[in-house]
Amino acid sequence: MALSHFRNSHAAVNKWEVVNPALFEVTLLPPALDGDQELTTQLLLEHVRSISGLDGLNPPMGTVIQKYKQAERVYLGVPEQTHLELAMTFSLNLNDSNENYIYTTLRKWYNKAFNPATGAYGLKKDYCGSMVIVEYNRDGSIWRKVTCNNVIPGQPTGMNDRNYDSGNEANEISITFQCDIWDDETVGLPVYE
């Protein structure tokens, strides 16, 4: 029996792979913090659970509306936002020293911008880091790589939420990062410089 719906589909006939939203890695490179920088980067990579906000790579354009009597003409305006906001969730563990090392790493990074214990503000050059987001196929080939520079952290949240009904759920925290500039290397799209 011929299945015309299958044979008429380029994706089916050519065996093109599905884009799997779970095949990604996020490498965070914070500014110099206490301890081994390479280990810090590896630990952050291992604990990333999710990332959202990549739609901001193509910021929505505002609109300009002109009127002539009762008719409207619509034009594209300027982007409504020119920086990128990425929300991330991290799983949490305690090390042999009983340190919640992901939370403390993210807090130390945030404290370089503003330390609530001392009231001290940092300079942007001291608290900016970078981030590399890679999305790949099941065979490991990369189809998108986004490199974010001038990455600044927000305050980690969710650390202090407690619930007796949480059962077997592990504690996670969320944090929003913002960056001024990024390079989007998506296969098939032009690279802008």
Image: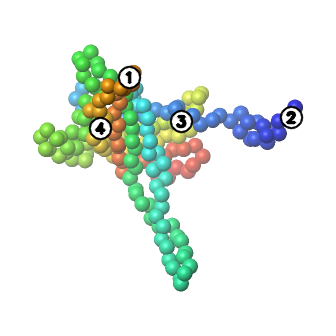
Q: Which mark is residue 2?
A: 2
Q: Split into 4 quadrants, where in the image is the N terminus?
A: top right
Splitting the image into 4 quarters, where does residue 72 fall? Answer: bottom right
Picture residue at 59% right of the left edge, 29% below the top: 138
Q: Nearer the viewer, residue 182 or 58?
A: 58
Question: Is residue 13 visible in the rendered structure shown here?
Answer: yes
The residue depicted at 40 percent of the width and 31 percent of the height is: 48
In front: label 1 or label 2: 1
From the viewer's perspective, tell me whether residue 189 is left or right of residue 179. Answer: right
Read off the residue under disc 3.
21
In the rendered structure, are the residues bearing label 2 and label 3 in contact, judged by CB atoms less than 8 Å apart?
no
Q: Which circle's residue, 1 or 4, is located before the other in the chain?
A: 4
Question: Circle 4: is it few (<14), some (14-19), or many (20+) Cα within 10 Å?
Answer: some
User: Which element carries disc 2, helix, strand or loop?
Assistant: loop
Query: Which residue is label 1 attached to?
Result: 167
Vertical side of 178 occupied by 35: above or below:
above
Q: Which quadrant of the view contains residue 99?
A: top left
Measure the C-alpha gap from mark 4 to mark 3: 24 Å
Q: CA distance from mark 1 to mark 2?
A: 50 Å
Q: CA distance from mark 4 to mark 2?
A: 56 Å
191 versus 97 height, above or below: below
